[in-house]
Image (spheres, rainbow, N blue to C red):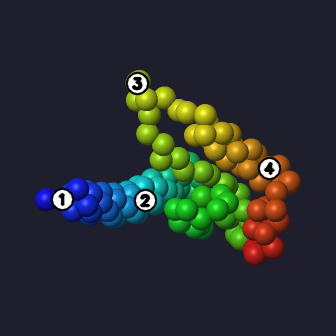
């Protein structure tokens, strides 16, 4: 095998591995969304017990911007909730970007709760 043939063979191998890894990454992204969806539906079921007056729960889906779960009573927004599918262990702690995203989510929920958010205005306008 010539040097050029070896180089081409290596390039083919690397390209095949890259395609495999890209498909795997796509599958993991879909898996993460499905995990988030299941957690949201579990959260809704758990929220129903302590919130019997809320007759309608809305979940937009994983990857959709804004508040994950909204609960309505008689058409009025009464509850907002975020779902986090971040996995931590004693050895694997939250990192800076994860902490930053959680902080933003909490600020968004607080703004909705205080009625100072465009999300709240859209929710009230839709009711």
State the CA–CA distance, disc 1 to disc 3. 48 Å
> Considering only vertical position in the picture, is 55 above or below 42?
below
The picture places residue 27, in percent across and down from the top left corner, at 35, 62
The picture places residue 26, in percent across and down from the top left corner, at 39, 63
Residue furthest left as drawn = 1
On the image, numbered disc 1 is attached to which residue? 2
Q: Residue at x 72, y 62 (%)?
A: 77
Whichever of callouts 2 and 3 sits on the residue coming sooner in the sequence is 2
Q: Quadrant of the N terminus?
A: bottom left
Whichever of callouts 4 and 3 sits on the residue coming sooner in the sequence is 3
- Looking at the picture, tell me which residue is in the foreground, 100 or 35: 100
Query: What SS does tag 1 mark?
Result: loop
Whether residue 38 sits left or right of residue 3 in the image: it is: right
Q: Residues within 10 Å of mark 1 (few under 14, many from 20)?
A: few
State the CA–CA distance, disc 2 to disc 3. 23 Å
Whichever of callouts 1 and 3 sits on the residue coming sooner in the sequence is 1
State the CA–CA distance, disc 4 to disc 3. 33 Å
On the image, numbered disc 3 is attached to which residue? 91
Q: Quadrant of residue 16?
A: bottom left
Residue 29: image tag: 2
Q: Residues within 10 Å of mark 2 (few under 14, many from 20)?
A: few
Residue furthest top as drawn = 90
Q: Nearer the viewer, mark 2 or mark 1?
A: 1
Q: Nearer the viewer, mark 2 or mark 4?
A: 2
Q: Residue at x 61, y 34 (%)?
A: 96
On the image, numbered disc 4 is attached to which residue? 111
């Amino acid at each position: 095998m010539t040097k050029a043939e070896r180089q081409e063979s290596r390039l083919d191998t690397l390209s095949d591995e890259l395609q495999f890894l890209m498909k795997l990454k796509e599958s993991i992204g879909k898996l993460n969304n499905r995990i988030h969806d299941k957690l949201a539906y579990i959260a809704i079921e758990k929220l129903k017990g302590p919130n019997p007056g809320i007759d309608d729960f809305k979940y937009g889906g994983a990857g959709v911007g804004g508040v994950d779960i909204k609960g309505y009573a008689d058409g009025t927004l009464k509850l907002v909730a975020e779902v986090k599918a971040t996995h931590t262990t004693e050895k694997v702690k939250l990192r800076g970007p994860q902490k930053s995203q959680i902080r933003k989510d909490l600020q968004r929920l607080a703004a909705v709760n205080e009625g100072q958010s465009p999300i709240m205005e859209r929710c009230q306008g839709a009711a």
